[in-house]
Image (cartoon, rainbow, N blue to C red):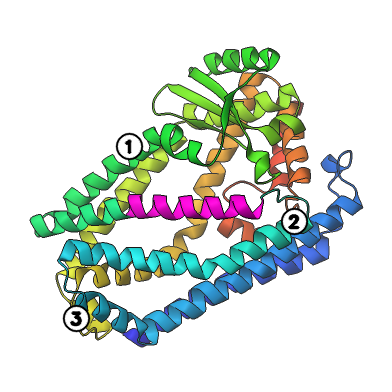
Amino acid sequence: MLIILLLAYLFVASFGYWLQILNLRHLKQYGDVVPLEFSDYIDRDVLKKTRDYTVEHSRFSIIESIALDSIVILFFFFGGLFNTYNSWIVSLNQNSVVSGTLFFLFLTYAKTILSIPFDLYSDFRIENKYGFNTMTGRLWVSDFLKSIGLTTILLGTMTASAFFIITMSPEHWWFIVWLFFLVFSLLIMYISPYVIEPLFNKFTPLDDETLEGPIKELMKKAGIMVSRIFRIDASKRSRHTNAYFTGIGRVKRIILFDTLLEKLDREEILSVLAHEAGHWKKRHILKHIVMVEALSFIGLYLSFRIIGTGFLNDLFALRHNTIFASLLILGFIGGIVAFPFTPLMSYLSRKHEREADGFAAVITGNPGAMATSLIKLSKDNLSNLHPHPLYAAFYYSHPPVVQRVREIHSMVTQE
């Protein structure tokens, strides 16, 4: 059975690498073609830079994945390290709550430390080379330490609480843990804009009255009450752009990257926010939460049933039968089982993006602004204009940008 699991993992990993290579070959073949809709904004020099950026990032991503995922996972699970690590945690002679918490925290720390060289190369080599990175070494260290601290607090709280529940209710823990995780995640969603996000960025009220008024009017049309509109100093880390909503319920805070405000005009910014409003209006976020929680509910129940058999510990011939080791094995197997569903999840996400685009086109009455905003953002972010269809079907949460622009242009012709 262990051999079957190993072969399944190798197949999934190999298939993922094959898709990435297929995507790179497709880009090399078609990457110098400027789409008609982009011709006023993008020339061959920009397209060449885009192709080089995508190729370099993709190659580095493959190397990082092989080193951090495939090799480490194979060595850990199938090379005997897992058994040794599990036995070492047991040898600390702590209760199950402390042992389980340390088990997952130490693994998280190990992965974070192993990722440091790759993160540094990505930020200070690749992103620097193409003009995106603006982060200093001091800021990188500060962010790293804050992230470690937050991980310790949040992951420590979740794992300690989960193992305490398991200890107190061995027959019904799966349901109580699911309920706790649901409440905890909603709490984090609520407090994050006020407690967590300000640790990394400075939020200042939008001081542009010519933009703030139209934004509030647009959100009012969408049925959204805007409490505050902020800009954040995203440019101190990267020149990439974004905008998002925070808040639970009808009252929202709108966050605009300073880089977005610099690169788009007023109508384009409104179209981007209308798209985000479309996600709320179409209940995409709610649907996503419901789906994730339903899958988590099923997953935790199945975990409870499987762990009770002792099969997982026997599968890896563990010297000590621990529930935290069983949960880690289930997570590993779950990743393999979930892989065939990746294109389905991506399809649903792309469907939601199209619905949000349609909503934005209707509520603004200006689909052309949405199209130009996407074109400008794809140019500024050096987005791949020519992904392989199969790769996009598997991994793209948004429709490929050329296809998306053409669909929006079709809305213009239908006006």
Residue at image location 49% in from the left, 67% down from the top: 113
> Observer-nearest residue: 301 or 264?
264
Would residue 317 be found to the left or right of residue 64 on screen? left
Q: Position of residue 136 (x, y in %)?
A: 67, 51
- Magenta portion: prevailing SS class: helix
Spatial distance from mark 2 to mark 1, Cα to Cα?
Answer: 36 Å
In reply to whether residue 372 is colored magenta, the answer given is no
> Observer-nearest residue: 300 or 366?
300
In the picture, residue 278 is in which quadrant? top right
Question: The residue under label 3 is which amino acid type?
Answer: His
- Which mark sits nearer the N-terminus, 1 or 3? 1
- Which mark sits nearer the N-terminus, 2 or 3? 2
The answer to the question of whether label 1 and label 3 lie on touching residues, with beta carbons closer than 8 A, is no
Spatial distance from mark 2 to mark 3, Cα to Cα?
Answer: 48 Å
Would residue 339 be found to the left or right of residue 132 on screen? left
Which residue is tagged 3? 320
> Observer-nearest residue: 192 or 15?
192
Residue at image location 60% in from the left, 49% down from the top: 139
Give the extent of the magenta segment: 136-155
Q: Which element is circle 2 on? A: helix
Placement of the N terminus among the 4 image quadrants: bottom left
- Which mark sits nearer the N-terminus, 2 or 1? 2
Q: Which element is circle 3 on? A: loop
